[in-house]
Amino acid sequence: MRELQERGVFVAIVSAGVDVFVASIASMLKVDDWVANGFDWDDAGWLRGPAPSLVNSHEKGLLVEKLARIEGIDPSGIVSVGDSSTDLSMMIPGSRFIGFNPARQRAVDAFREAGVPVVEGDDLRNLWQHLYGGEDFPGSGEGD
C-alpha cells in the first residue's frame, strides 16, 4: 500500500463483510478509507443483530461511485480489485477492474467473460504490472 500511496493513489476497501474485521484489515494496511456492514448494539452494549446493510455484495459499484464523488476522483482513475464475480459490480463506467486470486471457478469464468485481467495467487505485488502498464514492482526483491 505504501508504494501506491507514495504515488498519490487513494486506496479504499469496499466490503460486504463485517466492519470489525474490515476495520482491522484497513488499519493494518493503512488504507485511506473503508466501508463495510456492521452490527446493531443496544444502549447497554448488547448485540441486537445486524445493522442495516451498507454494502450489498451485488451493488458495490454504488459505494465506489460515492467514494469517487466524495474524493473527486474521475472514474478513469479508478481500478477496483476483487476475488468474486459479484465484485465486478465495482467496475463502474469508465473504470477498470482486476480479478485477484479468484477462489471459485465461477469467478474465473465471470472475469474472463468481462474481459478483465486476472492475477492468480495471493501476492498483491502481482497487481502492479496491470496497474502500471507492465512496470515491475519497485525493488522486486523478496520482502518488499
Image (cartoon, helix red, strand yellow):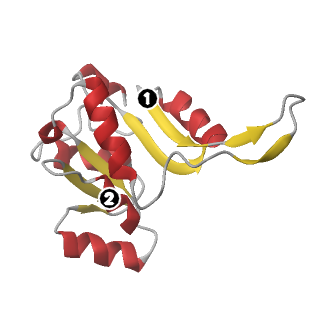
Query: What residue is shown with label 2?
Result: 89
Image coordinates of residue 100 in percent, x first then y, are 35, 58
Q: Quadrant of the C terminus?
A: top left
Dot 1 or dot 2: first in sequence order is 1
Residue 98, located in which quarter of the rendered image? Answer: bottom left
Q: Residue furthest left?
A: 133
Q: Nearer the viewer, residue 125 or 87?
A: 87
Q: Say how many tags the image has.
A: 2
- Disc 1 marks a residue whose amino acid type is Asp
Q: Can you give x and y, in whole percent of width and height, for residue 112 in the image?
A: 22, 74
Q: Is residue 54 left or right of residue 18?
A: left
Residue 142 left/right relative to 28: left
Q: Nearer the viewer, residue 123 or 115?
A: 115
Say which residue appears at 37% left-offset and 68% top-offset: 85
Q: Is residue 111 left or right of residue 143?
A: left
User: Which of label 1 and label 2 is nearer to you?
Assistant: 2
Q: CA distance from mark 1 to mark 2?
A: 19 Å
In which quarter of the view is residue 14 placed?
top left
Image quarter in which the N terminus is found: top left
Mark 1 = which residue?
33
Q: Nearer the viewer, residue 68 or 29?
A: 68
Q: What secondary structure is found at the residue carrying circle 1?
A: strand
Q: Callout 2: few (<14), some (14-19), or many (20+) C-alpha neighbours within 10 Å?
A: many
Badge 1 density bin: few <14, some 14–19, many ≥20, Cα 10 Å? some
The residue drawn where x is 39% and y is 56% is: 59
Residue 25 in the image, given as x and y percentages of width and height: 55, 37
Residue at 31%, 61% (x, y): give it.
88
- The image shows residue 117 at horizontal and vertical percentages of 20, 61
**CB atoms of marks 1 and 2 within 8 Å:** no
Q: Which amino acid type is shown beneath numbered disc 2?
A: Ser
Provide the secondary structure element on which disc 2 rests.
Answer: helix
